[in-house]
Amino acid sequence: MDSPATMAAPRALFVGRSTFDILYRLDVLPVEDSKVFAREFYAAPGGPALNAALTHALLGGHALLVSAVGGGKWAAALREELLRRGVELLDLADGTAYETPLSTTLLNAATGSRTIVNPPASLVRLPPLAAEWSNAVPASWGAIPPVVLCDGFFLEEASALLTACREAGAALCLDGGSWKPGTAEIAPLLTVAICSERFALPGQTETPGGDPESVMAWFAAQGVPCVAVTRGARSILGWERGRGFEIEVAKIEATDTLGAGDVLHGAFCHFFAMTRDFEHSLRKASAIATLSCQSLGIPTTFGGPPPVRPDGACAAPAVRPDAACAP
């Protein structure tokens, strides 16, 4: 049974990828066949859906996560962090041989850019979720949340449930980091699509600047009423039912851009669940995502424990996001 505090919190469901991330912040990226020492080191759960759920929870929301965690060396630490942060998990990989992926990221301290190495894609087949909400999720989750975010992973396993959520009136949002199998099928169900500039339609070549106009036009043609394209440090381009708008991104000295898009999606869901105001929610989420780039690790953005440097000293904690959350 939900507590009064939990019931008052905005609820959102996040469907997609979870990983365990190892981050090294380096003065320079290593050349081939060399060794380097990192300036800072951080290890924590990651993945687009998990990071978005974590952000929603850290902002005070009630986060429900449908993802594949399974077993392996990193699963216990991931589960422990979700429990500590109040994120409820439905594990698609429960009872299978699936193992939590370990993702390694090299952060360039000079530019804030990141280079990511993922393990080979898992070949373990995961069972699909039931289409009925009451049969697919734990009874303790209550009713279908007003906002559902999917990141394009595990669409085959969760598509029936996502359809049921949309038919029940939930706003279905897409974290469009890249085109994935099932994107075309899920698009007509979407209320919101927020895509990276690297999102390329089939037949298009992924380019540094992307083609935001074509992306927004394609989603609009599928009947999606609210579309946005994020462009890193450049402004966010938005489109809502035929009206275009632009959100300027504050100029900062970035420490870590890894997960900034995930933070934006999680914060957007948090505010959209309360207001259903697309542009307003996106502007507030953009401010929090920018703030997250100034510290290493998502919890640090919200006043959590700072990462530890190799010399044992703690990095300076980030500023709490109260100002960014103000209207």
Image (tube, rainbow, N blue to C red):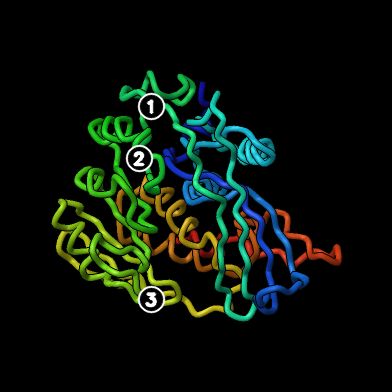
Q: Amino acid at mark 1?
A: Leu
Quadrant of the rendered image containing residue 117: bottom right
Q: Amino acid at mark 3?
A: Pro
Q: Which residue is mark 1?
A: 129
Spatial separation of the CA atoms under disc 1 and disc 2: 10 Å
Quadrant showing the C terminus: bottom left
Decide: few, some or many residues near mark 3? Use Cα within 10 Å; few <14, some 14-19, many ≥20.
few
Q: Earlier in the sequence, mark 1 or mark 2?
A: 1
Quadrant of the rendered image containing residue 85: top right
Q: Which residue is mark 3?
A: 208
Residue 195, compared with residue 140, is above or below; it is below
Quadrant of the rendered image containing residue 303: bottom right
Residue 323: x and y, percent? 54, 64
Q: CB of mark 1 within 8 Å of CB of mark 2?
A: no
Decide which of 72, 286 is in the foreground and name it.
72
SS class of the residue under badge 1? Answer: loop
**Image mark for residue 53:** none
